[in-house]
Image (cartoon, rainbow, N blue to C red):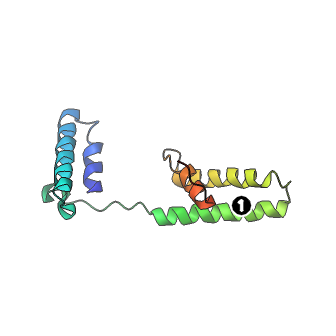
Amino acid sequence: MAAAIEKAASEVAADPRNALGKLAEMSHTIATRCAEHRPGALLDETYLKDLKPIRRHEILRLLLAVTLTLAAAVGISFLNPPEAATPLLIGGIGLLCFSLVYGNSNPRPLELLDSVRGIQRP
């Protein structure tokens, strides 16, 4: 389903009128089927044929970002910085690692870093 929506959204620049109409139709179909409690058939087969599932590799990205952050934390501990500066250095390096792994267009690196550090924000 995500691949069908992404494909329809990518067509907006080329043909806005038809692509937006198709997106609206797909959104209406999804909303209607959600209301009907049909999670297995949110879109018709006509939208889904010849599409491959989208792979985001979220687990691998998270593991890579956490590993880089932990490696940086160990490296910082060998440098023996002042105790007050250690959390700031590790947090800054961690944010940098998460931003590099997830890219700057994704707003989630700070949220993910906070969850790794055990902080919950409202």
120 relative to 59, above or below: above
Q: Residue at x 21, y 55 (%)?
A: 34
7 relative to 40, above or below: above
Residue that protrudes farthest toward the front in the picture: 122
Q: Is residue 2 visible?
A: yes
Please identify the quarter of the rendering in which residue 112 is found: bottom right
Please state the horizontal and vertical placement of residue 76, each as a whole percent of the image: 78, 59
Q: Residue at x 21, y 39 (%)?
A: 19
Disc 1 designates what residue?
72
Please indicate whether residue 33 sits to the left or right of residue 79 in the image. Answer: left
User: Quick one: label 1, few (<14), some, or many (20+) residues within 10 Å?
Assistant: some
Please indicate whether residue 74 sits to the left or right of residue 52 in the image. Answer: right
Closer to the camera in the image, 83 or 107: 83
Please indicate whether residue 50 sits to the left or right of residue 61 in the image. Answer: left
Please state the horizontal and vertical placement of residue 30, each as a whole percent of the image: 20, 52
Q: Residue at x 57, y 50 (%)?
A: 110
Please identify the quarter of the rendering in which residue 120 is found: bottom right
Q: Residue at x 66, y 60 (%)?
A: 69
Total marks shown come to 1
Q: Is residue 49 visible?
A: no
Dot 1 amino acid type: Ala
Closer to the camera in the image, 88 or 53: 88
Residue that protrudes farthest toward the top in the picture: 17
**Image quadrant occupied by the N terminus:** bottom left
Q: Secondary structure at mark 1?
A: helix
Please state the horizontal and vertical placement of residue 22, each as a whole percent of the image: 18, 43
Please state the horizontal and vertical placement of residue 44, each as a whole percent of the image: 14, 57
Please identify the quarter of the rendering in which residue 37 is found: bottom left
